[in-house]
Amino acid sequence: MEPIPAPSIDLVSLAPVLVLTVFGIMVLVTDLFIGKNKSALVFISLTGLLMAAISSLAKYDLPVYSFNGAYIVDHLSVFFTFIFCISSALAILVSIDFNQREGIKVGEYYSLILFCTVGMVLLASSTDMIMIFLGIEIVSICLYVLAGIRRNDPKSNEAALKYFLLGAFATGFLLYGMALIYGTTGSTKLTIIAEMIREGSVRSEPLMLMGVVLLIIGFGFKVASVPFHMWAPDVYQGAPTPVTAFMAVGPKAATLAAFFRVFAETMPEISPSWGILLYILSVLSMFIGNLGAIMQTNIKRLLAFSSVAHVGYLLIAIIAKNSLGSASLMFYMLAYAFMIFGAFGIVILIGRKGDENLEIENYSGLAYKHPILALSMTIFLLSLGGLPPLAGFVAKFYIFSAALKEGFVVLVILAVLNSAISFYYYLKVVVYMYMKEPIKEFNITLSPMTLFVVAIALFGTLHLGIFPGPIIALAQY
Amino acid sequence: MDISFDAIPLAHYLLLSATLFVIGVMGVLMRRNAIVVFMSIEIMLNAVNISLISFDRYLNQHDGQIFSFMVMCVAAAEVSVGLAIIIALFRNKPTVNLDEFNIMKS
Amino acid sequence: MELLIFYPLAGLCVIFALGVVFNKNPIGSAMSLIAMMLGLAGIFVLQQAHFIAILQIIIYAGAIMVLFMFVIMLLNLKGDDAVWKKREKNTLLTVLTGLLIAGVLYKVLEITSAGEFDSPAHVLETFGTVREVGTILFTEFVLPFEVASILLLVAMIGAVVLAKSKVD
């Protein structure tokens, strides 16, 4: 019997994944030995995230393919790794005081966030459908558990169940799409699939297109675009607030990165077929997300619908399928991370134990009591709406210019129109804060860590808005 | 040993796969019992495995089998987490009827 | 000849799959699902995927379904007409999906009978054996294999966090 040849393993490319996994396991083990005080776990997780971010720079001469073309370290993946590390770090910081208040004492919370980050990094760096599938599953399973981590709270349970059932359902579609694409091209590697499509040697074009449609359904569920967004409002509302913020940024960014790789980078030749579908998805997401948000009275549901609308804008970057599209995707997700963590940080500060104070009317008169908080919230909301000179405006501007470069004028007009609609509900919250009388006494404990996150987010939102140059240059490279 | 009987066209296998997938989707949409819905999702995953494996034989390679191996792995992971969620939920509210889960409304 | 084995197996699979969906009792559904998975294992053998066929029985029928049965027993779910009733809210959706998917099925039939795939490749006798699949798994697909271990670890942590009885 001849021995099996040793596989080629490139550990340096995998560095961020390895670091995060090691630290994740370290958190698990440390949790066994420390008592009620979980601050050591926070410290370990943050160190892990920092080291992962640094180690993602280990490769230069990008792009580097490894593991027989299943894994790539390129500009997109490194930039996204940074976004994931930042967003996970912010999520952990914002959880500290929240978890104390709500009595979430499981130490596994932090390791799940780290493992979820592992999944996200894998998802953004995979060029093999099997790896993309596994990455999506790692991320989703962590999120199912995180959404349901408040086991005594029926809302949290319900959110976890809904998220789980719809997520698993979507996995079925995603998988079927991948199977059909594998069957028609004969490979799971995106590079080979791209080659087959370019040469026109796909075995059965219609079967391939069916696979593409199923993939869009699967990805659409995972990023919560209309008409696959039904889970988003309930899950966002039911999950603990830091988890909501976490799942609105990192996992969404990772899935969009994979989405971009599979569609814009692998199959640009057949873009007329998937482009029109994404076009419809994008327009529907923007309209239904924004119109749905107008009717909400709960701030978490409002932000859920607004995130559906934001997915609509982000899909434009995939439809544009050019290099400016990928750069604008990166910039948008970075800006979005700051805006969302800022807004949710304030939601956490205002909120009381047991999900009290999450209605928009609870914000009335905030400006009189805590003018700085109200001002920060106003900045985050206006930035989400896309008011210059804030980060959200620059991000939208780049996405729209990527689309204009490819001639999608109508789409951009619709998107701008939607930005205008979105101001209606963002300003509604601002009006409540500045122009209404408080309905009850504010009783806000200004917890330092959450304030710190809000401060970082405020800095990020303003900095990316006023001096976007360096980051844009980094993103375009 | 060579395959002694005539192999049948791939279409049969793909049709079986598609049929089972559809049955799974219908099950998810029609039933209210969370556990049965979950089983229907398992049918969907199994249906995909048929496609993967039959493509494999017709392409004479093993990638699809590896893929279906990973699908099984994911299915096992999902089942453990999913059933844990159902148990956690059952502690607070002894039902698995999906229509009764509507605390959150817009 | 293959047709003669395929059709009974396929028929059984479809019948048992329908059994899962239409059975009033969750235990009955689970039993149907086990039967369906055994049928699928037969189909995999027919496709020369011996290794996967064995895994199908060990993992699905052996591990996953036992877990299902265990949870059904633990929660003491009974066959309940109220639980079985169709979801009225979803009827329109179901009909629409049904129509859509019927169209898709028709399309699949049309496409696949068009002939790109009709002739199966001549496969070696070793095709689908543990050695062949294992070699590929540990060389070309070593990364997915390792990543799957992270996935299982996460699932394990998740299940423990959610289901452990002591609530702290």
Image: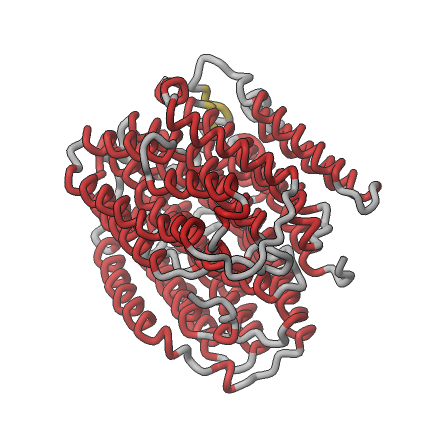
Q: How many numbered circles does the render carry?
A: 0
Left or right: A462, with B9 as reference point: right
Residue A324 at x, y = what percent?
Answer: 29, 26
Q: Nearer the viewer, residue A207 or A362?
A: A362
**In the picture shown, does residue A459 fall above or below A272?**
above
Residue C66 at x, y = what percent?
Answer: 65, 66
**In the picture shown, does residue C65 fall above or below B66?**
below
Q: Is residue A124 visible?
A: yes
Left or right: A377, with A34 as reference point: left
**Residue shown at the point (40%, 68%) measured from the top left:** B23
Q: Nearer the viewer, residue A116 or C138?
A: A116
Left or right: C8, with C110 as reference point: right
Quadrant where the C terminus of chain A sits is top left
**In the picture shown, does residue C1 fall above or below A278?**
below
Q: Is residue B61 visible?
A: no
Quadrant where the N terminus of chain A sits is top right
**Residue shown at the point (37%, 62%) measured from the top left:** B16
Which coloring applies here? secondary structure
Q: Nearer the viewer, residue B15 or A147?
A: A147
Residue A98 at x, y = what percent?
Answer: 64, 48
- Quarter holding residue A56: top right
Q: Nearer the viewer, residue A258 or C52?
A: A258
Q: Point out the residue furthest to the bottom here.
A: C81
**Residue shown at the point (67%, 49%) measured from the top left:** A99
- Quarter holding residue A198: top left
Residue C61 at x, y = what percent?
Answer: 60, 63
Left or right: C129, with A282 as reference point: right
Q: Point out the residue furthest to the top here.
A: A61
**Residue shown at the point (49%, 71%) measured from the top left:** B102
**In the picture shown, does residue C116 fall above or below A394?**
below
